[in-house]
Image (cartoon, helix red, strand yellow):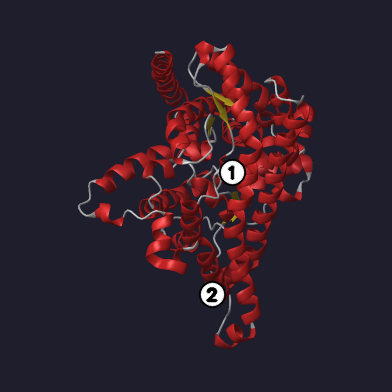
Amino acid sequence: MEQVFSYIIGLGAAVMMPIIFTILGICIGIKFSKALKSGLLVGVGFVGLSVVTALLTGSLGPALSKVVEIYGLQLKVFDMGWPAAAAVAYNTSVGAFIIPVCLAVNILMLLTKTTRTVNIDLWNYWHFAFIGAVVYFAAGSILWGFFAAVICYIITLILADYTADKFQSFYDKMEGISVPQPFCAGFVPFALIINKVLDKIPGFDKLNIDAEGMKKKFGLLGEPLFLGILVGCGIGVLSCKDGQEIVDKIPYILGLGIKMGAVMELIPRITGLFIEGLKPISDATRELIAKKFKGAVGLNIGMSPALVIGHPATLVVSLLLIPVTLLLAVVLPGNEFLPLASLAGMFYVFPLVLPITKGNVVKTFLIGFVVLAIGLYFVTDLAPYFTQAAQDVYAKTQDGAVNIPSGFEGGALDFASSPFSWVIFHLTYSFKWVGSGILVLVTLFLMVMNRRAILKYQKTMKN
């Protein structure tokens, strides 16, 4: 069983998602050719996103490493990045069975009307495997690992339902889509609280600037393309020891700026492929539900947040937070994690935050600032337990991607910085039965409340 699912996961999102979408399209009555084209467009979108992400990390990585070397910023928690974190998560006993277990939970919740999300974003199930694996190795019990993973999955589905309507109204062409990815969903409670606090500050409403407002107010400086060039050139300058080296490296500095600008410009174009491939599936699903499943009105397809990371506000805020997060990592007392490989995951913090802030760049930036500052501490705290899991996986697989350098601990911004991972881990591992009891009660309460909301929604739609 472990080998079968390891093989499936090993195909990668670019191969998995076209297969899933083609099968799903045929099942809901779309012609094979149209379903295949939809699946392939989604697959091409993932390939394009991987290429652009590699361009970002490949360009910034050496420059940031040079900055770390020049200013002596090395910290003890080594940034493994999300690919290594996913590899660790999926290559454990919890990860081997996470897909069938979570799909079974999803079906049970659909039948009991405690969710209206059909989560087909199988690749991102590694987040649930991650928290399960960390708890498993810390507690020494696979049952505790699966408990943590399932709790995280259920709460994520409920938050996907809670945010679905706002998500669909904020983003174009997202009807019938929700985002059941725990890294995104984990920041929703923070965003709701911080957004309300900011609304109560007198005069703050005058800072209501969205992406279009930035373009009008700052002209070329408000364009993600130009901001990318400026930030890229700035990091290039910081990677030089002195003025003479800056002069010598002008071609390199300008090249880094252009590459960063290219990332900012290409991401929105690539995410358009996801939307183009998704639309036929989404439309056909809604039509099928309307005809055949009148009692199940309002079901949503759970998809990756990669669909919407090309939004201008996400690009601008993520770009500005890259140098800010590096600075925070160095100046925050007690933090031991310096994010480098994980910086590409910055874009995934905001897909569910923007609908709450209504695209306000200032609010979104402040929320990102707070959650990432706290997230650095979460990564530092979980690093010893994640290192246990990574060392076990490396011993069994000899996979160089999950090999932590001697003298370091391992960590990753993706999901390890989420409140979900930290809270679920400590309630399950540190407080054992008492903490687990609290998690069960909170989860059951959320399920009951979500069921009431679903029944009310369906009754409203029928009338």
Label 2 is placed on what type of residue? Leu
Q: What residue does disc 1 label?
A: 306
Foreground: 24 or 448? 24
Tell me what residue is drawn at x 55 percent, y 56 percent: 339
Q: Residues within 10 Å of mark 1 (few under 14, many from 20)?
A: some
Tell me what residue is drawn at x 75 percent, y 42 percent: 395
Tell me what residue is drawn at x 44 percent, y 60 percent: 328
Mark nearer the N terminus (2 vs 1):
2
**Looking at the rendered structure, which numbered label has been put on residue 238?**
2
**Count of number-bearing discs:** 2
Q: Quadrant of the C terminus?
A: top left
Q: Residue furthest left?
A: 202
Looking at the picture, how far across and down is residue 251, in whole percent? 65, 79
Looking at the picture, how far across and down is residue 266, in whole percent? 62, 56
Task: Give the image quarter of residue 86.
Answer: top right
Label 1 is placed on what type of residue? Ala
Marks 2/1: CA–CA distance: 30 Å
**Looking at the rendered structure, which numbered label has been put on residue 140?**
none
SS for dot 2: helix
Q: Along the horizontal axis of the image, is 186 left or right of 357?
A: right
Q: Is residue 197 above or below residue 235?
A: above
Q: Along the horizontal axis of the image, is 207 left or right of 310?
A: left
